[in-house]
Amino acid sequence: MVMWPAVSLLGFVVLTALVVLMGMQSTKRYEAEKQAASVVRHPAPESAARVTAAATAVL
């Protein structure tokens, strides 16, 4: 008689823990991608000079 409520409660706790773990993993992946995308990439100085010279030559 007490077994079914206990099994139901245990299943609920296990499934809730699974959802929380999946959410934590997804959040960690999202934060890593967001941080990688926010890194500012500056062109190398000589390549920037070439682009400027080429743009000036075209004008």
Image (cartoon, grey):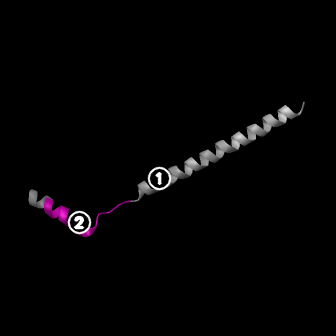
Mark 1 burial class by Cα count in 10 Å: few <14, some 14-19, many 20+: few
Residue 19 is situated, as x and y percent measured from the top left of the image, at 65, 42
The type of residue carrying mark 1 is: Glu
Residue 28 is situated, as x and y percent measured from the top left of the image, at 55, 52
Residue 54 falls left or right of residue 8: left
- Quarter of the image where the C terminus is located: bottom left
Secondary structure of the residue carrying tag 1 is helix
In the image shown, does 44 or 5 lie closer to the viewer? 5
Q: Which residue is mark 1?
A: 33
The type of residue carrying mark 2 is: Ser
- Taking the spot 14% from the left edge, 61% from the top edge, the residue there is 54
Residue at the extreme top of the image, as rendered = 1
Looking at the image, is 15 positioned above or below residue 57?
above
Alpha carbon of mark 2 to alpha carbon of mark 1: how far?
Answer: 27 Å
Looking at the image, is 34 positioned above or below residue 42?
above
Q: Quarter of the image holding residue 14?
A: top right
- Taking the spot 65% from the left edge, 45% from the top edge, the residue there is 20
Q: Is residue 42 magenta?
A: yes
- Taking the spot 51% from the left edge, 49% from the top edge, the residue there is 30
Residue 46 is situated, as x and y percent measured from the top left of the image, at 23, 69
Magenta-tinted stretch: 40-54
The majority secondary structure of the magenta stretch comes to helix
Q: Which residue is mark 2?
A: 47
